[in-house]
Amino acid sequence: MKNISRRRFINNSMIGAAGLASLPIIKSFGMSANNTIRIGFIGLGQQAMNLLNGFSRIKNVQIVAGADVYGIKRERFEQRVKEYHQSVNQKADITTYKDYRKIIDRSDIDAVVIATPDHWHALICIDACNAGKDVYQEKPITFTIKESLKVAAAVRRNDIIFATGSQQRSDSNYQHAVNMVHREAFGKLKKVFAYVGPGPDPYNLPEEAIPADLDWNQWLGPMPAVHFNSALNPPISLNPPVNETFWARWRYYKETGGGFTCDWGAHNFDIGQWALKKDHSGPVKVIPPGYQGAKALTYVYDNGLEMTNEPYDEIKTLGLKFWGEDGWIEVSRGSIAASDDSLLPEKDENEDAGMYERSPLHLENFIEAVRARIDPIVPVEVGQRTAVCCILGNVAYELKRPVSWSPEEQYFINDPEAEKFYHRAYENGYKL
């Protein structure tokens, strides 16, 4: 890994990522005593544990609450927080809840971390915004296109500092690669490979007994009912301590997630759109693989450039390759290569290199943004456009034909069939 220094990163990120327009934040902000930012976690699974490790390392940040509908996850979270405080000779101040609203209702909590399954993101985030809480929300920021617009509106309406888990934006290799594209260091950009993997599959797992301490109806929330399978909530134990051995697989099924298109697309399509200078725009057409010879899922932009879900090597690395008139540069987690060594960054060692799931630099950027009341490196509008890009890919997969999209109106063009995927109707009494 070749990384920029922390000081250079903070200086760069505080003015926003290259090419992003800053939006003024005028909200006054009263932090807790002693300049401490008090945080509550909502959703306490595997990613929350990674984020807990990251946020705990930041000075003057205190984790004070957690919420989850699964009892054993609440117990584990409380135990982890207490163990950390004990290790640094501090008194633990931690309370856990089954209902996330009890965290949002607390006046002593400044910000929330939302790490639930995607179908809960919008409702929780909007509630948090309306309560004046700053938000760090896992990617993709929402489950549907309509939700993404509602979340962005709630953030700006309430003057909230919002960040999303697009950690690759905080990695200097990705920053360098995009900078080389923008500088046309290897000629004008001709095409982009951004490989993320396949779309979602139908939910076909067998039904299993629901654990006694899991409120399955509350886990489903606004989503149409599906039966329980432990792949959706990987088993863990406290005695002996055994954590998740795989990522929860709700993300890979049509009924419960967006497949790799949304899971990894929120990372790699995000970097691709940044390089294409489409952070505040998007594709005008999305073509599924197999349609009239299309080799891979293809995003077409108004300047004629294309981004394809296509691997650039035999092992199908989840990364990106940018092809210019005079060369190329490819980047993935922990690796950067180019057609010429002059295109590569200078070596700059960093002890946090590669720690993507709990990237201290990315989390520190959010905390610094909260303190300064400015946008972080990935503002809500960028996360919103990335989420839409991913979802559009799944719409094209589902319809097995191209989908035309208006980035200006953020709506489908003359396509009633595609419009059905603009939002998923809420059930069980929930409303957006």
Image (spheres, rainbow, N blue to C red):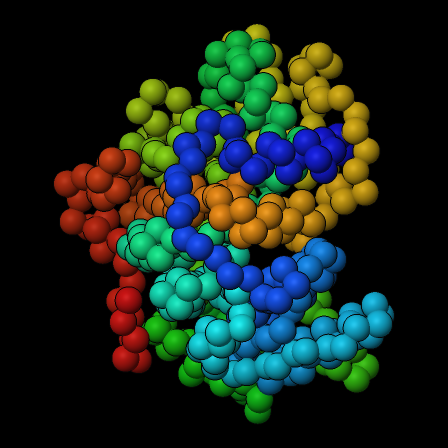
Q: Quadrant of residue 70?
A: bottom right
Residue 45 percent location from the top left of the image:
61, 69
Is residue 260 shown above or below 277? below
Nearer to us in this view, 221 or 203 = 221
319 to 364, vertically: above or below: above
Residue at 47% over, 52% down? 161
From the viewer's side, name the closer residue of 213 and 157.
Answer: 157
Residue 423 x %, y %: 28, 58
Q: Residue at x 32, y 30 (%)?
A: 292
Q: Residue at left 59%, top 81%?
A: 96
In this view, 187 is above or below 21 = above
Residue 337 lies, in percent from the top left, at 70, 24
> Relative to the observer, which residue lies in front, 393 or 153?
153
- Residue 60's place in the image compared with 336, above or below, is below
In screen coordinates, is 286 left or right of 170?
Answer: left
In which quadrant will I find the C terminus? bottom left
Write down the quadrant of residue 281 in the picture: top left
In percent of width and height, residue 141 lies at 44, 54
